[in-house]
Each structure stands twice: as structure tokens, then as C-alpha cells.
Image: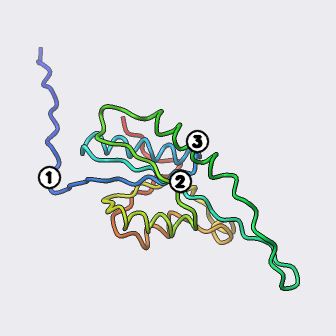
Amino acid sequence: MKTQEKLVRPKPTGIALKRILVPIDFSPLSKKALQYALRFAEEFQTEVILLHVIEPEVPPVFDGFMIAPPVISTIPDGARKLTRLAGSVQTARISSLKSTIRLGLPAHEIVEAAKELDIDLVIIATHGYTGWKHFAIGSTAERVVRTAPCPVLVVREREHEFV
């Protein structure tokens, strides 16, 4: 009989991650991206920063008169959701988990947060729209990949699952 040898993974060299940014829109797919981030954080002993971006509502314009923008009521709701999510994934296996909320266009705010917070890796979900939906809605993930100051890992709906 063969004795089973314990598989020992060598520690990664040459890659030093300190901070991982995870944009969260509370979709199941963004929560999947968070799971990837948690695995990376465990492996590299890094800090994870959750970012929720609230898009401003554009007020309608009638004959040159701009209607006052409505009060944004999603900030408290988004803050509560983000706090709950952060609390649900807090684990002793990662060094730190923080969360923040920004107001603006998602792709721009994600890139700006990555610059300001000195992020080493962004892990973002993409909904994988193609054709007309991609043209009309655009891809936040694609814009982030093109302009981010650091590497970006894009998590798709049908993707390899880590064990």
C-alpha cells in the first residue's frame, strides 16, 4: 500500500497583495466575486474592501427647466445591505474587511477608489451582456478593466468554481 503524502502547496512568490477591492451591487454574481476575493484574501493575508456605488438619478428636463433631483433614498438601504453583507462574511481567516459607499458612475468610482485606496487587485463580476444589451447598458467591468491602475479579475456567471 502506498502511503498518502500530504500535498503541500508552496507559498506564492513574486505577488504581494495588500488590498483587494470588490465592487458590490448585491446581485448573486457580485456575491460570487466576493467569494473569490475571500479566497484570495485567505491565501495572501490581504485586506478586502467592499465598494457599493450608488448611481445618481438624472432629473428630467422639460422645455429647458430642470426639475429638482429627488432625494436619494437608496443610500441608507445600500449602507444597511453593505453592513449586513460585511458582517456575514467577516472571518478570522482574513486580515481585514472594510466597506465603503460612493455616489457616481460605477466604473469611474471603482477606478477612482482603486487609485485612492492603493488597491492591488480588483475582483469584479460581469453579467456578460452581449449584442444590444451590451450596447445599450454597457459593461462596467469592461470599463474598469480598461482604466484600472491595477490588475482586474473578472468573475463571470459560468466560471470555474474554486474548491
Kindly identify the residue that appears in the image at 44 percent across and 52 percent down.
Answer: 22
For mark 2, does the 10 Å Cα neighbourhood hold few (<14), some (14 to 19), or many (20 or more) residues? many
User: Are the two marked residues, 2 and 3, in contact with CB atoms closer than 8 angstroms?
Assistant: no
CA gap, disc 2 to disc 3? 11 Å
CA gap, disc 1 to disc 3? 38 Å
Q: Is residue 134 left or right of residue 155?
A: right
| Label placed on residue 80 | 3
Q: Is residue 37 left or right of residue 68?
A: left
User: Are the two marked residues, 1 and 2, in contact with CB atoms closer than 8 angstroms?
Assistant: no
Kindly identify the residue that appears in the image at 60 percent across and 48 percent down.
Answer: 78
Q: Is residue 103 left or right of residue 118?
A: right
Of residues 107 and 156, the one nearer the viewer is: 107
Give the residue pinned by disc 2: 52
Of residues 148 and 114, the one nearer the viewer is: 114
Secondary structure beneath dot 2 equals strand
Give the residue pinned by disc 1: 13
Image height of 142 relative to 95, above or below = below
| Label placed on residue 22 | none
Secondary structure beneath dot 1 equals loop
Which one is closest to the eye, mark 1 or mark 2? Answer: 2
For mark 1, does the 10 Å Cα neighbourhood hold few (<14), some (14 to 19), or many (20 or more) residues? few
